[in-house]
Image: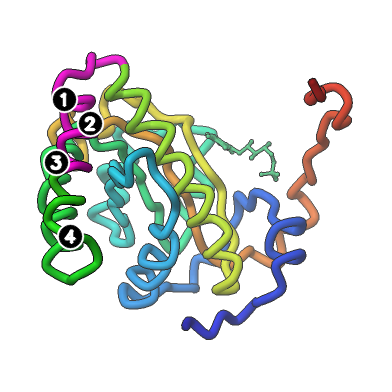
Amino acid sequence: MTDFVNNNFADILLNRHSVRHFDPAVKISRDEMSQMIEEAHVAPSACNLQPWRFIVIDSEEGKDKLRTFFMRFNMPQLETSSAVVMIFGDTEAYKSYRDLWNKACNDGQISPEKRDEVLKTFLPLYENASRESLLFDAKTNSALVAMQFMLVARAHGYETNAIQGYASSAAAEALGLDSERYVPCMAIAIGKPDPAKQQAEVHSQRYPVEKISEFL
Ligand SMILES: Cc1cc2nc3c(=O)[nH]c(=O)nc-3n(C[C@H](O)[C@H](O)[C@H](O)COP(=O)(O)O)c2cc1C
């Protein structure tokens, strides 16, 4: 079990706010970043397809690539964060699905009969799915892992800003991914807040619960 630096769920959840100015001196090690991804990707996904891919941009060369398609108003986060984590949805995740269930079977978690039943039920849904539903699936599931990553970041003592202000049609290709297969979900800037700039960060309003919900 991870020893989180912040293990207070109320604080992690209720005191998360987008941070757009980070301390540029703070670096997050690749080991810790991988650990955070490991913790985030226990997120649920439809049929456990896990249709997500993380591209961690923590170098100047990597940030140069982001500079080609990020909108100007997101430059402060890009320039000051320890890293920008681009989360893509994978529209071909179902092609690895067989490997996942074979592993569960080899590990003794399920019987070969159960594995075959699962594959027979779910795989055709994806193999015959429209492009539209593969995109929908890839993006909605990736949004869950993205949210989870933002909360995990707080448990590690970091702050984040989710970002969609970029040319999404250019994102995959700029980062060397197959743009037919991978669809951008969001970028997440991560780091420690710049103490000098925190006064400028505005805490966001929320609508009243009655406006956004109803009971039937
Ligand atoms: C999918 C998504 C995309 C966003 N894109 C941007 C963005 O491009 N630039 C930015 O500064 N903030 C962006 N935000 C942050 C929102 O503005 C912010 O979450 C919202 O105003 C609520 O504030 P809070 O995060 O402090 O609670 C994005 C948030 C989400 C969830």
**Label 4 SS:** loop
**Label 1 SS:** loop
Q: Position of residue 181 (x, y in %)?
A: 17, 30
Q: Which of label 4 and label 2 is nearer to you? A: 4
Question: Which residue position is annotated with label 4?
Answer: 111
Report the amino acid beneath label 1. Answer: Glu
Q: Which residue is most to the front?
A: 113
Q: Which of label 2 and label 3 is nearer to you? A: 2
Question: Disc 4 and disc 1: Cα gap in Å?
Answer: 35 Å
- Category of crowding for the residue at label 2, using alpha-carbon neighbours closer than 10 angstroms: few (below 14), some (14–19), many (at least 20): many
Report the amino acid beneath label 3. Answer: Gly
Labels 4 and 3: the sequence-earlier one = 4
Left/right placement of residue 97 relative to residue 87 reads left
Labels 4 and 1: the sequence-earlier one = 4
Question: Which residue position is annotated with label 2?
Answer: 91
Question: Which residue position is annotated with label 1?
Answer: 180
Labels 2 and 3: the sequence-earlier one = 2
Left/right placement of residue 141 relative to residue 97 reads right
Report the amino acid beneath label 2. Answer: Thr
- The part of the chain drawn in magenta is 117-132
- Category of crowding for the residue at label 3, using alpha-carbon neighbours closer than 10 angstroms: few (below 14), some (14–19), many (at least 20): few
Question: Disc 2 and disc 1: Cα gap in Å?
Answer: 8 Å
Question: Which residue position is annotated with label 3?
Answer: 176
Report the amino acid beneath label 4. Answer: Ser
Left/right placement of residue 98 relative to residue 121 reads left
Question: Disc 4 and disc 3: Cα gap in Å?
Answer: 39 Å
User: Quick check: marks 2 and 1 in contact, CB under 8 Å?
Assistant: yes
